[in-house]
């Protein structure tokens, strides 16, 4: 698969970038995508919600009032879940929601996500983003030139680019990551994905490396 390479002014440079069909041209596997996104979202949960059950609520050591003669229901403890301030029945407790799936499934999910975005024409290749000092305006102008303004944008670089990161962090829904980092969820969540030309090899290499590890 070949895609045109754009300049930072949003113009077609005339050159083409070669993308691996094994990553950007497969039939997306919806089941693999679902499982990996579900895993990612579960792993983001803190699991810190906590309530006290009947045995954990303070008080209730003695009988609230006598058994008979009051006209009220019999009470053995003020810690009953039926009373205000009593314990909670089957309430949440701290737990770990995270889990994992096979490496091959994660690899297939990422490849499926990239292919889905390629099918939607949501991927654009940029020759290079050269910003000498943090300037939000420069990134905003870039997004406007590439028709990515007011959209969820994922910008991928070959290596850590702190200047670009600082320039984009004040723009809502714009995220800058190294090319090997995006998860299946982040790929699918972006409406437009901008990839620097020299980041293509890093992106494809990270997936190929994961394939070798899973083999």
Image (cartoon, helix red, strand yellow):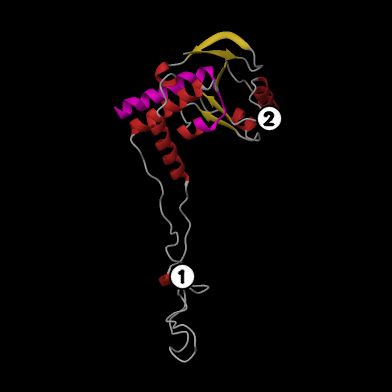
Separation of marks 1 and 2 at Cα, in angstroms? 52 Å
- Magenta stretch encompasses residue 12: no
The local secondary structure at tag 2 comes to helix
Does 122 sit above or below residue 93? above
Q: Position of residue 117 (x, y in %)?
A: 50, 24
Q: Which of the two labelled residues, at mark 1 and mark 2, occupies the earlier sequence position?
A: 1
**Do we see residue 132 in this rendering?**
no
Residue furthest to the front in view is 71
Determine which residue is flagged by label 2: 136
Determine which residue is flagged by label 1: 87
Q: Which residue corresponds to the image point at 46% horizontal and 70% vertical from the top-left?
A: 87
Report if the CB atoms under discs 1 and 2 are less than 8 Å apart.
no
Judge from the rendering whether residue 43 lies leftward or rightward of residue 155; answer left or right: left
| Most foreground residue, 102 or 75 | 75
Q: Position of residue 21 (x, y in %)?
A: 42, 16
The local secondary structure at tag 1 comes to loop
Q: Which residue corresponds to the image point at 53% horizontal and 24% vertical from the top-left?
A: 157
Does 8 sit above or below residue 182? above
Q: Which residue corresponds to the image point at 37% horizontal and 25% vertical from the top-left?
A: 209
| Most foreground residue, 149 or 34 | 34
Crowding at dot 2, Cα within 10 Å, few <14 / some 14-19 / many 20+, comes out as some
Q: Position of residue 178 (x, y in %)?
A: 51, 28
Judge from the rendering whether residue 27 lies leftward or rightward of residue 5; answer left or right: left
Segment tinted magenta in the rendering: 188-215
The mark closer to the camera, 1 or 2, is: 1
**Do we see residue 17 in this rendering?**
yes
């Amino acid at each position: 698969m070949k895609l045109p390479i754009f300049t930072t002014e949003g113009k077609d440079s005339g050159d083409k970038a070669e993308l691996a069909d094994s990553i950007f041209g497969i039939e997306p596997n919806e089941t693999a995508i679902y499982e990996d996104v579900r895993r990612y979202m579960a792993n983001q949960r803190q699991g810190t919600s906590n309530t006290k059950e009947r045995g954990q609520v303070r008080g209730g050591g003695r009988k609230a009032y006598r058994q008979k003669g009051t006209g009220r229901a019999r009470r053995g403890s003020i810690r009953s879940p039926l009373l205000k301030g009593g314990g909670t029945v089957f309430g949440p407790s701290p737990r770990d929601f995270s889990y994992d799936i096979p490496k091959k499934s994660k690899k297939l999910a990422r490849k499926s996500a990239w292919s889905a975005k390629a099918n939607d024409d949501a991927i654009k290749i940029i020759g290079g983003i050269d910003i000498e000092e943090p300037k939000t305006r420069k990134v905003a102008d870039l997004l406007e030139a590439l028709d990515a303004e007011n959209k969820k944008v994922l910008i991928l670089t070959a290596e850590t680019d702190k200047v670009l990161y600082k320039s984009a962090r004040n723009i809502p829904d714009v995220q800058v990551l190294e090319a090997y980092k995006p998860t299946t969820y982040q790929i699918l969540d972006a409406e437009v994905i901008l990839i620097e030309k020299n980041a293509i090899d890093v992106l494809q290499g990270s997936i190929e490396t994961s394939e070798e590890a899973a083999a």
